[in-house]
Image (spheres, coloured by chain):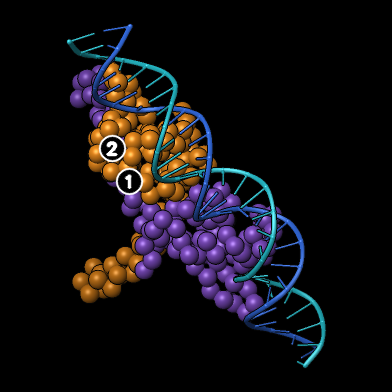
Chain colours: A purple, B orange, C blue, D cyan
Amino acid sequence: MASVTDATWTALADPHRRAMLDVLRVRACAVGEIVDELGFTQPTTSKHLRVLREAGLVRVRTHAQRRIYSVDLEQMAELDAWLAPFRQLWNERLDALGEHLDRSEDEAKGK
Amino acid sequence: MASVTDATWTALADPHRRAMLDVLRVRACAVGEIVDELGFTQPTTSKHLRVLREAGLVRVRTHAQRRIYSVDLEQMAELDAWLAPFRQLWNERLDALGEHLDRSEDEAKGK
DNA sequence: AGCTTATATTCCTTGACACGTATATACGCG
DNA sequence: CGCGTATATACGTGTCAAGGAATATAAGCT
């Protein structure tokens, strides 16, 4: 149960790696497929995948010579947990705005 | 309307800066308060705040000599937007599990 | 205007990271 | 077992970001 650590955030700091996660979000991929899709060299791709793996963001399963990488959704959920308090503040602000608008609307409808 | 860019993710990669965001999430702070709270030196704190500002993650308003920093919740919401598709997959997985459990439960209750 | 407080910036050194090239490991197959 | 495919690692190099110390800017105060 890998938790979110510095490595996780560092891994996300690189745009290539975020692109890789976006690809893997759609479906699990072998290394070669990611190379084809994103156009990075194979060694670069493998190195980035290693960083993502050590960050707990992706998982590998070996299938013959291929290594199939997929997103670790649980880790993403933990990232989300860090973001959640901020989102809550944001939603509170939206709610306050919505209430404000509703009040005007209710007054118009005479509700 | 600053959007999420590489700078945003890079800013989040640093644990000190995430700590600062956690402090600012509770309430807006002047630089000195952050220095006191987290124990970084003043120049370091200012430099990190600059990075956060240029990343669109915090806003400043000047109040006499003090500069009051606060989290830019809108930017956080945009970060959340990137994470959202992953969260959705995660929730679908939880729902599938829940449905599975509900089915067993319903059979037990004869619903 | 001088002094103090509050914050920002500069310079310098150091360490981490990304990329390319070359090479190593692993697996399957004839 | 030798060969091809698929992936990982090692090495050398250039770039960039972080921290400390010193200094600059800015605003209030007497």
Mark 2 — residue? B34
Q: Is residue A78 above or below residue C22?
A: above
Image position of A12 (left or right of C19)? left
The x, y position of residue A30, in whole percent, is: 61, 67
Q: Which residue is mark 1?
A: B19
The answer to whether residue A31 of the structure is visible from this angle is yes
Identify the subunit bearing mark 1: B
* Labels 2 and 1: the sequence-earlier one: 1
In the rendered image, the vertical position of residue B73 relative to residue B96, given as above or below? above
Return the x and y of residue A4 as percentages of the image width and height: 38, 58
The N terminus of chain A lies in quadrant: bottom left
Q: Is residue B22 above or below residue A44?
A: above
Label 2 environment density (alpha carbons within 10 Å; few <14, some 14–19, many ≥20): many
Q: Name which residue lies at 44% across and 36% down.
A: B51
Which amino acid does the dot numbered 1 rest on? Answer: Ala
Res. A77 in view: no
* Residue D9 located left or right of residue D24: right
Residue name at image x 39 percent, y 58 percent: A5
Residue at mark 2 to residue at mark 1: CA–CA distance = 10 Å
Q: Residue at x 59, y 62 (%)?
A: A47
Q: Position of residue A45 (x, y in %)?
A: 63, 60
Q: Quadrant of residue B109?
A: bottom left
Label 2, secondary structure: give it. helix
Q: Amino acid at mark 2?
A: Ile
Asked if the residues shown at circle 2 and circle 1 are in contact, with their CB atoms under 8 angstroms apart, the answer is: no
Element type at mark 1? helix
Other residues around mark 1 within 10 Å, as few (<14) / some (14–19) / many (≥20): some
* Badge 2 and badge 1 both on one subunit: yes
Q: Chain of mark 2?
A: B
